[in-house]
Amino acid sequence: MTTRVLGIGATLIDELYFTTTALVPHSSNPAHKTTHIGGVMHNIMYHLALLGAKPGLITAIGNDAEGQTIKAHFDQIQIDYAGVLQADASTGKYVSILDEVGNLFVAVCEDNCGKHLTVAYLESQLTYMKDFDLLLIDTNLETEVIQWLIHFANANQKLLIIEPVSVTKARKLAALDLTGVYMITPNEEELEALGRDVEASQDQQIAALLRRGVSNLWLRQGAQGSTWITNTSRFSLGVPTITIADTTGAGDAALAGWVFGFIQRENPTSCLQLGHSLALHILQQKGAVDSSLDAATLHHLQKKYYHD
């Protein structure tokens, strides 16, 4: 059986400013800009489309020129966007400043469209949503929408994965009932934000999330790789040293690579390898998505980085 994947979350215009010299805080810095269609869920679904998964996407875009650009982009790629909402607002924008070696210094996001992805709107898309087996959501969604989606997934026997996005947005999950969530994918800072006890150790935070009903925790640890954790097992996978060009979208790529492996029935280690391999690839280019990607390329990358 083919596993159908639906993403629900943000599509934005990304403006990335790369400083051309060492970044000096509290001062004007020379930079060059790149602009892309981005947003966490768009990036993940775009990679999955390039890998041949033919995913679906529910997202909100503006009724403006940038929204029209995004719609034209959707027409060109293999994403089912029947659930896209075009709001009477400006399309959301993510603006980041990165240092001269591609590390993120600071970013801001304004999204006046995301608030239109309400529970009422999702209820109008129930027939569409029930056609999918695996749901991926991000925390750009409103808190009550995230909780509704958790209950929807449980009631309809859907697997649900939550991407925390950022420390600030991850805090939305701290008070929620996470019973039945298949996987959450925080980095170490986001893990702290997910918890209810700020004084807890990392192991205590992990145990607390599992007690709250999360089946799998994929802890991202940057240059140290990542760790996969369940109630009965834990294993870590390292990453090779690379030269980073741009950190934008690396986490999105990792999740897309993992999901691709999962729907191909790969074993847990291979899924992590595929996730790491795609993230490593994206870290070495500017922009969050490589539009030339295909499944054969990803498997080649997996063999390149994890050949033993």
Image (cartoon, rainbow, N blue to C red):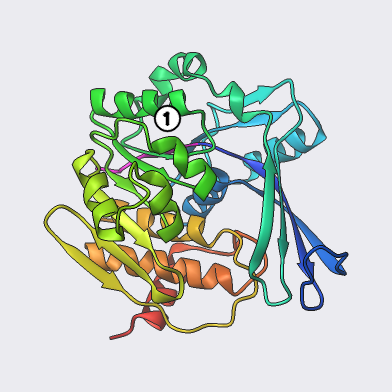
Region of the chain picked out in magenta, as a range? 1-8
User: In terms of secondary structure, where does tag 1 sit?
Assistant: helix
Specify whether residue 138 is in view: no
The answer to whether residue 292 shows anywhere in this view is yes
Q: Is the residue 252 above or below the residue 211 in the image?
A: below
Number of numbered markers: 1
Residue 6 highlighted magenta (yes or no):
yes
Image position, residue 259 (x, y; %): 36, 53
Tell me which corner region of the image, top left, top right, bottom left or bottom right, holds residue 140.
Answer: top right
Residue 110 at what x, y percent from top left?
70, 38
Residue at the spot 74% in from the left edge and 25% down from the top edge:
89
Quarter of the figure that contains the N terminus: top left
Q: Residue at x 60, y 77 (%)?
A: 244
Which is more toward the observer, 159 or 190? Answer: 190
> What amino acid is labelled 1 in the image?
Ile
Picture residue at 22% right of the left edge, 39% below the top: 213
Q: Is residue 176 left or right of residue 36?
A: left
* Foreground pick, 264 / 109: 109
Q: Which residue is mark 1?
A: 146
Q: Quadrant of the C terminus?
A: bottom left
Residue sitting at x 68%, y 77%: 101
Q: Magenta stretch: residue 174 in it? A: no
